[in-house]
Image: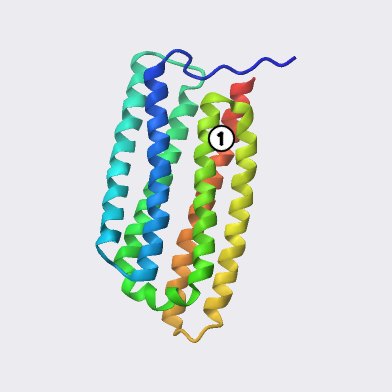
Amino acid sequence: MSKETPQLFGKTRFLEGKIDEFLDKLSEGVIYFESGLLLLVERGVNDACDEKLQQMNDLKARCNEIRRSVVGTLYSEMLIPDFRGDVLSLLSDLYGLLDVIVDCYQEFMIEYPTVDKGAVEFLQELKNLLAVVTKSVQAAIMAARAFFRNPSAVRDHIYEIRVYESEADRSAIRLKRMIFSSSLSLVQKLHVRDAVDAIDGIADLAEDVSDELSIYAIKRAL
């Protein structure tokens, strides 16, 4: 009979709460990204889009504060020496993923007057891509939660991430075919293609996080 892997921080409720908050903020940021980008494409730049960007930047700042607090506590209290490096790397990777998401949205805000001429023509497929990319990131966040609480469950979430990443690639290919068979000018086609690649790239980063998580989870289970 296999024994259950204990929660990583045991009785250290402070750290457990901090990491829960960190993951909650990440999840919230992904929701803002999806809803904000849909608003941007459907209605153009408006106050609601600006509000989403501000909310995402606030979340990013809070996540950075939490990450630094966890780093300080792990080293000052000499906690979990065997897994400290893995935890810090995971938090750094997840924060980097949020950073890319916020930067991507901000660039869309800046370039939208050019993007919107082509993006609205492919709106439904763009929504499909955005939905599956969002699912890939949320699955990565769930995998991270499992790592801290139940590492044996990480594998299931990793499988989901890989499925979503593959579907994102397929959706991106469909979009590009639609783009380059359309009547848009070459400049517009290239611009919309770059937008598609930027969104699709987020799913690739989520998969990168899952690759690292699979290793961390195996080490925890040993």
Q: Is residue 20 visible?
A: yes
Looking at the rendered structure, the secondary structure element under dot 1 is helix
Indicate left or right for 183 with 99 as reference: right
Q: Quadrant of residue 104?
A: bottom left
Which quadrant, please, contains the N terminus? Answer: top right
Which residue shows up at 53% across the image and 61% down it? 129
Residue 133 coordinates in the image, percent (x, y) = 52, 54
Which residue shows up at 52% across the image and 52% down it? 203
Residue 52 coordinates in the image, percent (x, y) = 31, 54
Front-most of 7 and 51? 51
Q: Quadrant of residue 211?
A: top right
Q: Is residue 14 above or below residue 25?
A: above
Q: Is residue 74 visible?
A: no
Which quadrant, please, contains the C terminus? Answer: top right
Name the residue beneath numbered marker 1. 213
Q: Is residue 219 above or below residue 115?
A: above
Which residue shows up at 51% across the image and 57% down it? 131
In the displayed orientation, state which residue is furthest to the right.
Answer: 1
Amino acid type at mark 1: Leu
Residue 153 coordinates in the image, percent (x, y) = 62, 31
Indicate left or right for 203 with 18 as reference: right
Which residue shows up at 58% across the image and 64% down it? 171
